[in-house]
Amino acid sequence: MGNTVIGVGILGAGNIGGAVARAIVDNAAAIEQSSGLTLRLIGAVNRSGPVKASEIGIDAGLISTDAAALVDHPDVHVIVETMGGEQPAAALMARALAAGKHVVTANKEAV
């Protein structure tokens, strides 16, 4: 039996979200070896405009400005919300939860 693949989408590609994305990409092999789980970064969204992939250290094809499309992506199982603020973060997290996805956030304002 193969490893379980867990697709991750990150809402907010700033300092925190970018670091989370980079950590997933950089540590994927170690996570897989120790847990048997394959974390796959499906995408990262930046609501305040384009972010250079080189600034985050991930593939440019993974960066988008369409948060709803990332939440709705069928390969995303976990949404990591690092946008901050009440909206659109709360609505996007509610949308993810309604679709049966797991949500990780430290955003007290939106919760």
Image (tube, helix red, strand yellow):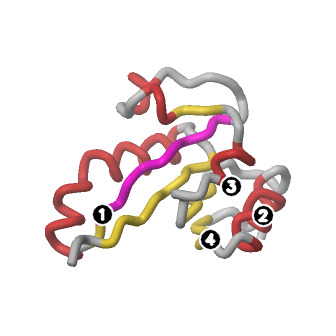
Mark 2 or mark 4, which is nearer the start of the sequence? Answer: 2
The residue that label 3 is drawn on is 72
Q: Quarter of the image for the N terminus: give it.
A: bottom left
Residue at figure coordinates x 14%, y 68% from the top left: 33
Residue 74, placed above or below residue 25: below
Name the amino acid, label 4: Lys
Furthest residue in direction front, as rendered:
1
The residue that label 2 is drawn on is 95
The reply to whether the C-beta atoms of the residues labelled 2 and 3 are less than 8 Å apart is yes
- Cα separation, mark 1 vs mark 3, equals 20 Å
Report x, y in % for residue 68.
74, 48
- Cα separation, mark 4 vs mark 1, equals 17 Å
Report x, y in % for residue 91.
83, 59
- Cα separation, mark 4 vs mark 2, equals 9 Å
Mark 3 or mark 1, which is nearer the start of the sequence? Answer: 1
The residue that label 4 is drawn on is 101
Name the amino acid, label 3: Asp
Q: Which structural element holds mark 4?
A: loop
Q: Quarter of the image for the C terminus: give it.
A: bottom right
The residue that label 1 is drawn on is 38
Name the amino acid, label 1: Thr
Indicate whether residue 43 is drawn in magenta: yes
- Cα separation, mark 2 vs mark 3, equals 8 Å
